Image (cartoon, grey):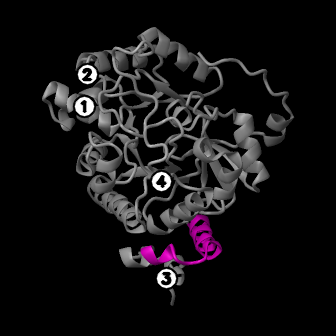
Amino acid sequence: MDVLSHAVAGERLSADELRELYSLPLPEVAAAANELRLKRSNPQVVTYLIDRNINYTNICNVACNFCAFYRTGKQKDAYVLSFPQIGQKIEELMNIGGRRILMQGGVNPDLPFEWYLDLLRYLKQQYPEVRIDAFSPEEILGLEKITGRDSLELLTRLKEAGLDGLPGAGGEILVDEVRAKAAPARIKSSDWFRILQTAQGLGLYTIASMVIGFGETYEQRVAHLIKIRDQQDRAMSQYGQGFAAFAMWTLQTEHTRLKGKAPGATAHEYLQQLAIARIALDNIPNLQASWPSMGFKVAQVALYYGANDFGSTMLEENVVSVAAGHHRTHATVRQIVRHISDAGFTPAERDPFYNIRQYPDVQAILNEKPPVAQPLA
């Protein structure tokens, strides 16, 4: 049996076998990934989530070379949103049926830990039905340094105040040699896994992520995937839950200090890596397509390369779009439903844990007159 036959048969591939996939014709790798996707998730359904990104501050002292979003505290356009401003954004989400926010910011040394606790308490009091997935491992590491407390104490108190989950941001390539070149002060891979494992042990929602295009080798990409797979094995064994999904996108460098220094990744590379991720991550059933980085058309193709989810509405994606210089900051439910349907699947609205909330009336949505675009708050 060749390596693809082993994969389709449900066998776990070794690092050497995964490395071999990069030398095979992409249509063959895609076919195997698609077959596994059909086995591991509902073959007729592609899910999506109605949610909103909220970046509560853009002040950050990590200064990653691939980030065009962060500001120092002295720059004129630096900001920290007030609690009512964040609340207004949540109300806009609720008006379109969303009940989950993804809230992240920079590592802001001027915000004390009590500010985060007060924010969570305020949001849970005002909007008790809204899930709050917030504060990446990088932000938690920053709070460890500011407070002198460990992640277990910090996350326990944040959970008590209303935190529901941690985003998997900051993963990029979980090989420190790659991370040191792209962002010397960036969180180390060991700390990323340590903090997310702590979150998993507390029952907090987490996802795994990957960003390609830093100039990493195939071996380093494989190492990243195996580390994710191993952590999922540990979490499932110890806690009965782990990463709810895997999300992958490509490095965007247009307005960053890495422009001309990092190659980025093509649509071909994105689809290849997504297919290999589906084959490698035999213990994570849900893989997202990335319309913010790749556009809607490539995201549709991704549904045949291993992805079973179209991502979310986002409403206000700032980080990837600012780095890339494009305007893919949000999507309407109508756009997502149309692209899933046009790709040949049944759209289903889900919750963050990939439980289906409802099957929308596709024809009713597509026949609606699109609303006049309004600027986001």
* Residue count near mark 4 (Cα–Cα under 10 Å), binned few <14, some 14–19, many ≥20: many
Label 4 and label 1: CA atoms lie apart by: 26 Å
Q: Secondary structure at mark 1?
A: helix
Front tag of 4 and 3: 4
Label 3 and label 2: CA atoms lie apart by: 49 Å
Q: Which residue is mark 4?
A: 213
Label 4 and label 3: CA atoms lie apart by: 25 Å
Q: Which is nearer the N-term, disc 2 or disc 4?
A: 2
Residue 28 colored in magenta in the image: yes
Front tag of 4 and 1: 4
Measuring 28% from the left and 17% from the top, which residue is drawn there?
A: 111
Q: Secondary structure at mark 2?
A: loop
Work out whether residue 282 or residue 63 is closer to the camera in this orientation and state it. Answer: 63
Q: Which residue is mark 3?
A: 3
Q: Secondary structure at mark 3?
A: helix
Q: Secondary structure at mark 4?
A: loop
For the residues bearing labels 1 and 2, Cβ distance under 8 angstroms: yes
What segment carries the magenta color? 19-39
Q: Which is nearer the N-term, disc 1 or disc 2?
A: 2
